[in-house]
Amino acid sequence: MSTIFRTMAAGCAGAVLCLPALGTPDAGGAKVGDEAMTCEQIATELAPYVQQMQPNVQALALSQQQQVQQAREKLAARQAERLPLSAMATAGALDPTGASKRAYVAAEMAQSAKERSEDAAAANSPLAKQADAQRKQLAAQGEQMQGNARLQRLLQLGHQKGCDKK
């Protein structure tokens, strides 16, 4: 049941969907018997809203998982690429001529430039653009739902009753 409130909270991300629910109740969203509703009843009435948001939440979650996996792979590759640099740094510290240190500094600068270029490419990748579009779509959906007085009333009731903490 608390997953309904978590899903609604995910939809709130970037859209301030939940903030009005913490304020004063809107008479347009109230129904007779609201105060007597249980968390389960509130969750049941929230379910259609969650179902509307679920596809966008899932799509964004999948894109973000793919981004995390790519970042892990990139980190592993970078660690392997930087391993020889640590040996060069040690050699540079021991070389009285300074030639090893100069070679290390040049290699370090080249590696850093390569990583910055990779980071810029990842930020502009189709997956990053897709995730950004999905975030914006989810935020727009949340903003649209913000105007739904009944939804706001249900979220307020759920918060008042502590349903979001169960």
Image (cartoon, grey):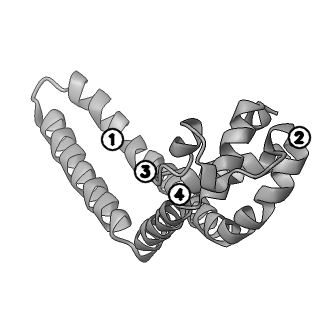
Q: Which amino acid is tagged 2?
A: Thr
Residue 52 location (% of width, % of height) = 68, 71
Left or right, 162 with respect to 63, comes to right
Question: Helix, strand or loop at disc 2?
Answer: loop
Which sits earlier in the primary sequence, circle 2 or circle 1? 2
Compared to residue 101, the image places residue 128 above or below, namely: below
Which sits earlier in the primary sequence, circle 3 or circle 4? 3
Q: Which amino acid is tagged 1?
A: Leu
Residue placed most toward the observer, 123 or 110:
123
**Label 3 neighbourhood size at 10 Å, few (<14), some (14-19), many (20+)?**
few
Q: Which amino acid is tagged 4?
A: Gln
Left or right, 77 with respect to 95, comes to right
Q: Distance between the residues labelled 1 and 4?
A: 53 Å
**On-image quarter of the C terminus:** top right
Q: Distance between the residues labelled 2 and 4?
A: 23 Å
Closest to the camera, between mark 1 and mark 4, is: 4
Which sits earlier in the primary sequence, circle 1 or circle 4? 1
Residue denoted by label 1: 85
Residue denoted by label 2: 38
**Label 2 neighbourhood size at 10 Å, few (<14), some (14-19), many (20+)?**
some
Q: Distance between the residues labelled 3 and 1?
A: 11 Å
Residue denoted by label 4: 146
Q: Distance between the residues labelled 3 and 4?
A: 44 Å
Closest to the camera, between mark 3 and mark 1, is: 3
Residue 20 location (% of width, % of height) = 52, 44
Residue placed most toward the observer, 21 or 107:
21
Question: Helix, strand or loop at disc 3?
Answer: helix
Q: Which amino acid is tagged 3?
A: Arg
Marks 2/1 in contact by CB < 8 Å: the verdict is no
